[in-house]
Image: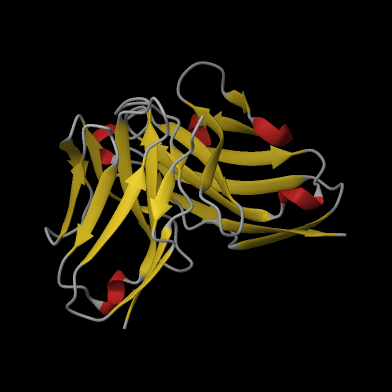
Amino acid sequence: ETGVTQSPTHLIKTRGQQVTLRCSSQSGHNTVSWYQQALGQGPQFIFQYYREEENGRGNFPPRFSGLQFPNYSSELNVNALELDDSALYLCASSAGPREGKLFFGSGTQLSVL
Amino acid sequence: AQSVTQLGSHVSVSEGALVLLRCNYSSSVPPYLFWYVQYPNQGLQLLLKYTTGATLVKGINGFEAEFKKSETSFHLTKPSAHMSDAAEYFCAVSDGFGGGADGLTFGKGTHLIIQP
């Protein structure tokens, strides 16, 4: 059983740039959720993708966008990066949109300078 | 809106001692409650969850938690701490199963330190 994998593990960008983070879901899972974890904080829900559609969204601006592909992998795109976007971005997959057990990847550490 | 408060950003216990990590929540609907653990440089792993039914929930690695509606609490316990329990622990709440369209709302986390 392949777990959730995220790439890259670390990324450094400058303010105003755009970034794409990638996530491969666990085998058999059709739902992907993205979370932002700032230093010293708990993860914050960005959005969820199910059947290639955004299925729900947290309190994040439109410059945070995503995609889900037919193989259920997913991308998180952030435009016009701000310093406050520096955080660990976590991807989690699950067997369905209302499934309680989320399987998290190790995250992508994004630093915005 | 839901929220989670974890009392104590750091908790230190001796190896073999009782572990107690506190979590209080607020929710306008019957909550679904979770505890996740995060080891250094790893993603979060589900320890246990409460949805409905029995209020005492047993999880992995000897942890358990009790849902107390009257106290709006979901504290995590383990009778005897082991060095391998040192990690960051997050309590989370959802108003719909695994979060669904609204995701999980996490607390700020409690760093558990185990003293030899």
Taking the image as drawn, is residue B55 in sight? Answer: yes
Q: Is B13 placed left or right of A31 in the picture?
A: right
State the quadrant of the C terminus of chain A. Answer: bottom left
- Using the image, determine if residue B51 lies above or below residue B6: above
Q: Is B84 placed left or right of A111 in the picture?
A: right
Report the number of discs.
Answer: 0
Residue at (44%, 56%) from the top-left corner? A42
Residue at (31%, 42%) from the top-left corner? A33
- Using the image, determine if residue A68 lies above or below residue A42: above
Residue at (73%, 33%) from the top-left corner? B62
Residue A50 occupies which quadrant of the picture? top left
Residue A95 occupies which quadrant of the picture? top left
Display coloring: secondary structure
- Using the image, determine if residue B61 lies above or below residue B23: above
Which residue is nearer to you in this view: A38 or A50? A50
Q: Residue furthest left?
A: A62
Q: Is A58 placed left or right of B67 in the picture?
A: left
Taking the image as drawn, is residue B63 in sight? Answer: no
Q: Position of residue A64 (x, y in %)?
A: 18, 58
Q: Position of residue A27 (x, y in %)?
A: 42, 29
Residue at (30%, 57%) from the top-left corner? A21
Which residue is nearer to you in this view: B9 or A56? A56
Q: Residue furthest bottom?
A: A113
Q: Is B6 placed left or right of B10 in the picture?
A: left
Q: Position of residue B104 (x, y in %)?
A: 36, 42
